[in-house]
Amino acid sequence: MSQRDFVSAEEVAQRAGVSRSAVSRAFTPGASVSEATRQKVLQAAEELGYQVNHLARGLMRNESGIVCLIVSDVATPYRSALLRELTLQLQLAGKVAMLINTDRSDGSVNTALQQAIRYRADASVILSGLPDKSITQLCLRSGQRLVLINRDEDQSGPLHINLDDREAAARVVTAFVRAGCSRLAFANSEAGTPSLMAREEGFIAAARDHGLEVVVERHGWTGYEAGRVLAQRLLTRKERPDAVFCATDLLACGFMDAARHQFSLSIPQQLCVVGFDDIEQASWSSYRLTTFSQPVAAIAREAVTWLSENGVVQGKSLRLHSDLVWRDSVRGG
Amino acid sequence: MSQRDFVSAEEVAQRAGVSRSAVSRAFTPGASVSEATRQKVLQAAEELGYQVNHLARGLMRNESGIVCLIVSDVATPYRSALLRELTLQLQLAGKVAMLINTDRSDGSVNTALQQAIRYRADASVILSGLPDKSITQLCLRSGQRLVLINRDEDQSGPLHINLDDREAAARVVTAFVRAGCSRLAFANSEAGTPSLMAREEGFIAAARDHGLEVVVERHGWTGYEAGRVLAQRLLTRKERPDAVFCATDLLACGFMDAARHQFSLSIPQQLCVVGFDDIEQASWSSYRLTTFSQPVAAIAREAVTWLSENGVVQGKSLRLHSDLVWRDSVRGG
DNA sequence: TTGTAAGCGTTATCAT
DNA sequence: ATGATAACGCTTACAA
């Protein structure tokens, strides 16, 4: 190992001419130190470049200040946007984010959670995948808090944050009907996550209420390429859909591009499209996609305030509202 | 604080009927334990859900296993892609990433670095901004390794990873000339980071070698919107450019959208465009942008292998090659 | 191979 | 308000 030699409270104490406990107190808000010693300590610390060792502090306080963010596909627009908000809010709350990248398997979520335990993270936030109940129980039992975002599962203990996917889907049907569409389609991936499936089911149910059938197609992972493939499948049917709800914006972008450049369809004249997430690209003038906003800031805020609460905390379930942001991919906004 | 009670090595030792050091050894690769006790310990640990406390281990070993990733604008395509590779490679190397989100100020980089010191991170990787030399010196002096990506500054000690921005820019000039373009423009942001400026200067210099002048315009932050504004400025000149090199793909996307939808220019017939980064969107069929690939995987690999090296390590400077990936935004690929 | 004991850098308790 | 002293959960000599 390389030569590691961080400056310790001991050294600061010597330089300041006080005891090491004085140093500790100087860095503990609300501790009883006279302003005089406090200043001496702070100055000595400044000169030496001292920073409190949070590993040791965490050991003592039984609180590491670490919050573990468990997520797959970090490079995806929606995920990275959520990540930004989360890290931002965490920092504001005086916590620090530990980022663990999982693949799409649940097994990798389990090992991620174990890593969180090893570093004695105060909490873990799970953005993708679903861990085994045995592991989540272990976390909870150990006093680690858990936040599950958009993964529905009804365990008690964690904080669950979800959107009103079903209701949102119903609003899409209304919009399509109002635009005069009648051949509805739903473009989904094969990921099968709770929120994705909720959108699908909600869409089908609401369509049925209007006496409409919907053609469902699923393919691959929830990305741009899958959107293109889905367009291929749906737009070559003899009864070509005139309105498609894509489970995410990324799918919608791929779908729109294929529809326009391969099938020479004009949107929204010949085809209405709605997405979900309101990623940045949805607002780009090549897309101008009508879509649902993910309230990422609100999600992050709820998560961080919950896991910053003192004392023993109750698990609860939050359902946040997603706004339909109207742009130009549906007729008659 | 909530009730935190993680299971400790002590408890495992009792259940397995061995000493606590035996437990420690069972979890230390290469330690001298008999297979028999090892199994006893492992089983007891399994049953109790024991995980080694890395806070305490880090304290003893003087090595936390934490690597701090310091970055602004995480939600940006290029940044998040680099982040993905970095976290991936780090995990493969048995390290864990701590993510600190900075704003664009150098001050926030400084505080981020202090946070890295507090958690006794083995290393820090800086993707954005530039810390004060006093802080980097403190890190180095403390034995914390530093990796600076695309921020050039010639300090000795850290690992510097840069691209061949200048040479890349020269290749763009060649491509433009070959396409029969003569009114060259460079679209940049006002961020003024070393790599951005290197592209600008390299482009101007290479153009001059061909006896060509280039119009330079700079605006705002390096994003889509800035690209639109830059298009506004450059495409309304009486001598309208017929080729523009955008400092990043995000700028290029905005530029292309404005060029096509506002100025009704067709690309590449009336206007050639080249970007930089090869973000995912560059390959989308609405753009098909000719651009330079950021070798994110290679960058991450170099960074991680360097900071995983044992012993005292030398700072060094790496210059990686960026390939020109030809798509359809320049005539005659 | 195994157990005992010392030490890592903190904070918290307890006198003073 | 301040300084000694005992934890915290681990690793690692040092003995056995």
Image: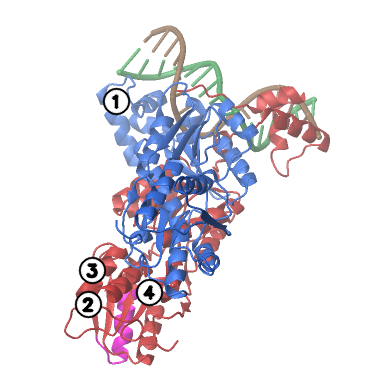
Chain colours: A blue, B red, C brown, D green
A300 on left or right of B24? left
Q: How crowded is mark 3: few (under 14 residues within 10 Å), some or many (20 or more)?
A: many
Disc 1 chain ID: A
Please report the bounds of the magenta region as a residue range. Answer: B199-213
Which amino acid lies under the numbered mark 1 shown in the image of this protein? Answer: Thr
Q: Please name whichever residue, B20 or B155, is drawn nearer the observer in this view of the structure.
A: B20
Give the residue pinned by disc 2: B234
Give the residue pinned by disc 1: A37
Q: Main secondary structure of the magenta part?
A: helix
Disc 2 chain ID: B
Residue A48 in the magenta stretch? The answer is no
Note whether B45 is above or below B145 in the view shown.
above
A13 on left or right of B242? right
Which amino acid lies under the numbered mark 4 shown in the image of this protein? Answer: Gly
Q: In which quarter of the image is residue B130?
A: bottom left
Real-space CA distance between mark 3 and mark 1, rounded to the nearest whole angstrom: 55 Å
Which is in the foreground here, disc 3 or disc 1?
A: 3
Query: Is label 4 on the same chain as label 2?
Result: yes
| Sooner in the amino-acid sequence: mark 4 or mark 3 | 3
Q: Residues within 10 Å of mark 2 (few under 14, many from 20)?
A: many
Real-space CA distance between mark 3 and mark 2, rounded to the nearest whole angstrom: 9 Å
Answer whether labels 1 and 2 touch (C-beta < 8 Å).
no
Query: Is label 1 on the same chain as label 2?
Result: no
- Residue B229: give its label: 3
| Sooner in the amino-acid sequence: mark 4 or mark 2 | 2
Real-space CA distance between mark 4 and mark 2, rounded to the nearest whole angstrom: 16 Å
| Sooner in the amino-acid sequence: mark 3 or mark 2 | 3
Answer whether labels 4 and 1 touch (C-beta < 8 Å).
no
- Residue B275: give its label: 4
Which amino acid lies under the numbered mark 2 shown in the image of this protein? Answer: Leu
